[in-house]
Amino acid sequence: MAENETLDIGHARSGRWRKWRNSILSQGAVDEIATEGVRCLARTFKNLQQIFENENRVPLKEILNAATDSDGDFSDIIRRSRYGRDYLQMFESQSNQGLDDRSILENVLSLTTDRFLDQIREDPNGTRFPNAGAFREFASAVKEQMIDGIQRLAGQMADAPDRPLRMPPQSQEQKDRHQAALLGMSIGAQLGTSI
């Protein structure tokens, strides 16, 4: 069974998004944070595809059809779905607007990003930014860098909603940095400290 996805950054199942939050709060390189954000979206929506198909028995194509159909009725889809309801409500918010599959997916991916950025902005640890304007400026720069990745993910899902989403490529530098971070956490756990 695929693990349920939630839009709550504080939930135990939102570890990938908390890592992204920590990167934002540490005010790292915008392009690296944007790449990490696109990868979070890809993992989330890859998991959602499995949840919709296997757990809810409502494939992504059926969700997109309901959203693009002027008579689309989401009440039945939401009623039949135990998991991913927050995301289904975002799809529902895009229905009856005359949008195609790709535009709906781009909007839902963008809304997902916005929801997590809003929670990061409201995080008490967010005080690392001098003021709310500084956070908004930084978050806008990150989201701007994410646009191409969001469009790429939306295109993949729109072109083949029944095929699992492919993860965006990761540079060797990112892989090395991730491996070093994991090694540091492992050594820190053995020593009883954090590195």
Image: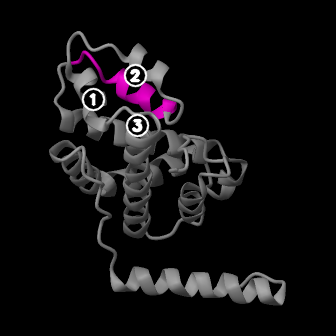
Q: Amino acid at mark 2?
A: Ile
Q: Secondary structure at mark 2?
A: helix
Q: Is residue 92 magenta?
A: yes
The label number, if any, that marks residue 119 in the structure image: none
Alpha carbon separation for disc pair 3 and 2: 20 Å
Foreground pick, 134 / 65? 65
Q: Earlier in the sequence, mark 3 or mark 2?
A: 2
Discs 2, 1 touching: Cβ within 8 Å: yes
Q: Amino acid at mark 3?
A: Leu
Q: Which residue range is magenta in the image?
A: 85-97
Residue at far top of view: 71
Taking the image as shown, residue 46 lies to the left or right of residue 127, namely left
Residue marked by disc 3: 111
Q: Main secondary structure of the magenta part?
A: helix
Q: Secondary structure at mark 3?
A: helix
Q: Is residue 74 magenta?
A: no
The label number, if any, that marks residue 62 in the structure image: 1
* Residue for point 34% across, 75% down: 170
Taking the image as shown, residue 119 lies to the left or right of residue 56, namely right
| Quadrant, the C terminus | bottom right
Nearest-to-viewer mark from 3 and 2:
2
* Residue for point 30% across, 55% down: 165
Alpha carbon separation for disc pair 3 and 1: 20 Å
- On the image, the x and y values in percent for residue 137 come to 45, 50
Q: Residues within 10 Å of mark 2 (few under 14, many from 20)?
A: some
Taking the image as shown, residue 113 lies to the left or right of residue 130, namely left
Residue marked by disc 2: 77
- On the image, the x and y values in percent for residue 140 come to 40, 49
